[in-house]
Image (cartoon, grey):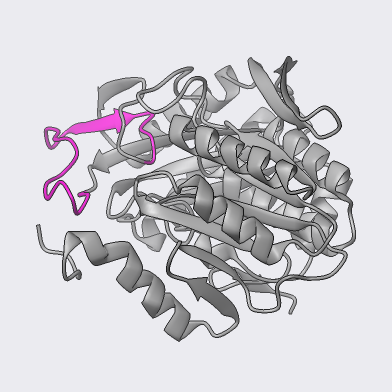
Amino acid sequence: MKKLINTVDAVVREQLMGMAAAHPELKVRIEPHFITRADSPVAGKVAIISGGGSGHEPMHGGLVGKGMLDGACPGEVFTSPTPDQMYECARAVDGGAGVLFLVKNYTGDVLNFETAVELLHGDGIKVAFALIDDDVAVKDSLYTAGRRGVAATVLIEKMVGAAAEAGYNLEQCEALAQRINNRSRSIGVALHACTVPAAGKPSFTMADNEMEFGVGIHGEPGIARRTYTDLNTLVDQLFANLLENSRYTRTLRTWDRSEGVWQEEAVTVEDLQSGDRVLALVNSLGGTPLSELYGVYGRFSELCEKSGLHLVRNMIGPYCTSLDMTGISITLVKMDDEMMTLWDAPVHTPALRRGC
């Protein structure tokens, strides 16, 4: 293993210190680790927080800023942040209108964010919880009960962040996050595995002509080990899988603020149909160059056109990575007028800037 690190146990701390030096518009706390906007808390504004294991940069710390996240909680590499990180981050950004946690569906993340919700509720801070589970590859995985939360998280952070900036209240932001998640689906593939610093070797090995189809962002396996032939064949397979899984039932888990209890209900993800407007994210898992992503998007746009899906917005680049994994994920979101307005709203973060 050759990586630009000193020691394995100092990786996240030293990278956070570098981020603080590069971005004075952010506040970076080292113990416990969390990142906030420098102008936090913003009085009267709902605070949006996400987080998870490090190694997926720029998600989440690189997406903290005006029009997106108010705070992010980075765990160690591929390891959930702890409840005290989430608790302290929420207290630092709460401007009186409440805090919304956007949580990827991984067992450790869910349990720790739930603990933080209960602690904040005990302090009298208004708090809400939106679970993201957009990965259609598997219904359960090594890391989850239910579908994994992956790259749609970035898109939800953008639109819900814009809504909070526009003055939506806590209940409206929570409902919006749930609605976007219910309109999102993602699928990923790896051509080469990533190398986790603590492991010192690739998380899995494959033959030169193989790929891991439906891979997770921690390198966990997906649907199958398949033969890789060429770009068009691969994109065709990804597109078909997204459409085949355009309707399925998921469990919606929410925090009842009035009763101080968790509630669950079954909801059905919305169908994708000819004539729908969609946003597509073609995402590098870390080791795939931008030029190849454009090749993927070109083929994907052809398939959307043939299927009657109208690609009205796109996002292409490394936004939800898996260290140095060579591979891609594709996310489709069914858009409406409100979501279009929020997507186009100004944003100013280290990794995403426009209109500011």
* Of 269 and 244, the residue lying toward us: 269
Percent across and percent down for residue 70 are 67, 64
* Above or below: residue 286 compared with residue 120: below
Q: Position of residue 190 (x, y in %)?
A: 30, 39
Find the residue positioned furthest to the front.
122
Observer able to see residue 310: no
Would you say 163 lies left or right of 287 here? right
In this rendered view, identify the residue nearer to me: 304 or 207. Answer: 207
Location of residue 295 with respect to 69 vertically, above or below: above
Task: Name the side, left or right, on which 51 lies relative to 201.
Answer: right
Q: Which residue is at the front of the view, 10 or 143?
A: 10
Which quadrant does the N terminus fall into? bottom left
- Please indicate whether residue 250 sits to the left or right of residue 213 in the image: right
Residue 128 visible from this viewpoint: yes
x then y, percent, for residue 256: 79, 29
What residue appears at the point 46 percent right and 29 percent down from the top-left corner?
Answer: 107
Q: Is 337 one of the magenta-colored residues? A: no
Q: Residue at x 33, y 63 (%)?
A: 12
The residue sitting at 73% across, 17% down in the picture is 267
Q: Nearer the viewer, residue 318 or 89?
A: 89
Q: Which residues are magenta?
A: 195-217
Q: Is residue 100 left or right of residue 298?
A: right
